[in-house]
Amino acid sequence: GDSVTQMEGPVTLSEEAFLTINCTYTATGYPSLFWYVQYPGEGLQLLLKATKADDKGSNKGFEATYRKETTSFHLEKGSVQVSDSAVYFCAFLNQAGTALIFGKGTTLSVSS
Amino acid sequence: DAGVTQSPTHLIKTRGQQVTLRCSPKSGHDTVSWYQQALGQGPQFIFQYYEEEERQRGNFPDRFSGHQFPNYSSELNVNALLLGDSALYLCASTLAGPDTQYFGPGTRLTVL
């Protein structure tokens, strides 16, 4: 069935380090892919998205490329900041276009 | 431009009680989805409402029901509360069709 697998956290980095959070998915067809971010005590914020193969989503220095061959959508950032500390969720939209299927989330902690 | 709003922010109930959560979609959106996020987990899809009807439902029991009003706002009702219903309940809105979902801040429900 539909599912998302994210690398387990927590991920602990120093400020200005390079970030990669791995995400792979199992889905029917070629769904739209998303990264959402959740800061402590808040709801989800859309970080970036990609709607077709080889698309690159980007926002606030974060990037992710839709890889159809490997069913992956890894999140990267070249230089993280303390303010990037949050939980990151990879997700895709189901074939009916109604429900988002989420991974379990990866906690990122950045120290100065 | 008003985003998705939810009320109340926090709620404490006891087992067996009933609860109603409310959501107003982002301006211009006509479709509302509800998700349950247990502590340390990714959100799970409950159902989606469009044109005042339930369009799709996730794997949740009938104790979970909803409603959408003509102004597109929505309610989530949960009957016969169980301890396991304690979670963050998130509302998301979108335009009809497979489009990006935008989330509200959530309602934290605690069942004692």
Image (cartoon, rainbow, N blue to C red):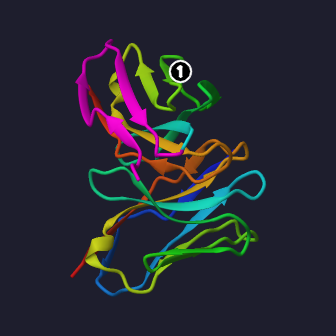
Is B66 magenta? The answer is no
Q: Amino acid at mark 1?
A: Pro
Is B6 magenta? The answer is yes
Where, quadrant-wise, is the C terminus of chain A in this rendering?
bottom left
Where, quadrant-wise, is the N terminus of chain A in this rendering?
top right
- In front of the other: A107 or B48: B48
Tell me the residue that label 1 is attached to.
B61
> In this orientation, does residue B112 appear?
no
List x then y, in percent, for residue B70.
53, 26
Answer above or below: position of A28 versus A56.
Answer: above
Answer above or below: position of B93 versus B48.
Answer: below
- In front of the other: B10 or A73: B10
Q: Indicate left or right for B87 with A69 as reference.
A: left
Q: Chain of mark 1?
A: B
Q: Residues within 10 Å of mark 1 (few under 14, many from 20)?
A: few
Q: Secondary structure at mark 1?
A: loop
Seen at 51% across and 40% down, the residue is B44
Seen at 62% across and 29% down, the residue is B51
Instruction: Give the magenta range.
Output: B1-28
List x then y, in percent, for residue B63.
48, 17
Seen at 56% across and 61% down, the residue is A34
Seen at 63% across and 52% down, the residue is B99
